[in-house]
Amino acid sequence: MDTRFMSVTIGLIIAAAAAVTQVSCRRVTKAQVLGFDWKNCGKPDAPAVLKTLTLSPDPIGIPGDLKASASGSTSVELSAPLSVNVTLEKEVAGFWVKVPCVEELGSCHYRDACDILNQLIPPGQDCPEPLHTYGLPCHCPFKAGSYSLPQSDFYLPDMDLPYWLTNGNYRVQGVLGGQGKELGCLKVALSIHSD
């Protein structure tokens, strides 16, 4: 293989990784999420499994309306501490580059998703709609059983995103863990295009 080609390739990968770590945010006032796809990536006997997930329209506009439905199940109670390991990759020059964890965004380890839920929705406060309407929990523990969200309407507002997260192809893997065991795994692929 040509040494110059290899040097340029390595240089591009290093430059891409350096660019991706910049955290400068900007308000996204018009963006689209395209080609959303997902799959379970856990072991066949994983306790927590997403069975269905449907989002529409395609593309999804930000800001804009979103229709979503989902169903899943867990054969064990999901209780604190509930860890989540996220791996985020961005396609750069034909290569998938792992985005490091910077200010809680990117490829991060979250020690307790239950604590994060408590920060977003204080205990004692009703779960937001449509979870409240359908009797779906938003706090740990999540009892063993099946959960289903019928098709529901959501509004996605303008949002502040790191500039490196506003255009490109992405892959995300989330691994849910508890008591030293993997409980479930989900992979998502999507593209984001913004002005």
Image (cartoon, helix red, strand yellow):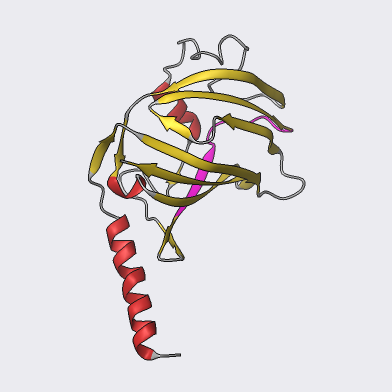
Locate residue 142: give its quadrant.
top right
Residue plotted at (71% across, 27% down): 144
In magenta segment, residue 142? no
Locate residue 62: give its quadrant.
top left
On the picture, is 26 further left or further right than 142? left
Q: For the C terminus, which image quadrant?
A: top left
Q: What stretch is highlighted in magenta?
A: 75-89
In the rendered view, tell whether residue 60 sits above or below residue 23.
above
Quick one: 129 or 43, which is closer to the camera?
129
Farthest residue toward the right? 45
Quick one: 43 or 118, which is closer to the camera?
43
On the picture, is 187 further left or further right than 145? left
Residue plotted at (58% across, 18% down): 152
Residue 40 in the image, given as x and y percentages of width and height: 66, 45
Quick one: 63 or 20, which is closer to the camera?
63
Residue 78 in the image, given as x and y percentages of width and height: 62, 31
Residue 13 in the image, given as x and y percentages of width and height: 36, 69
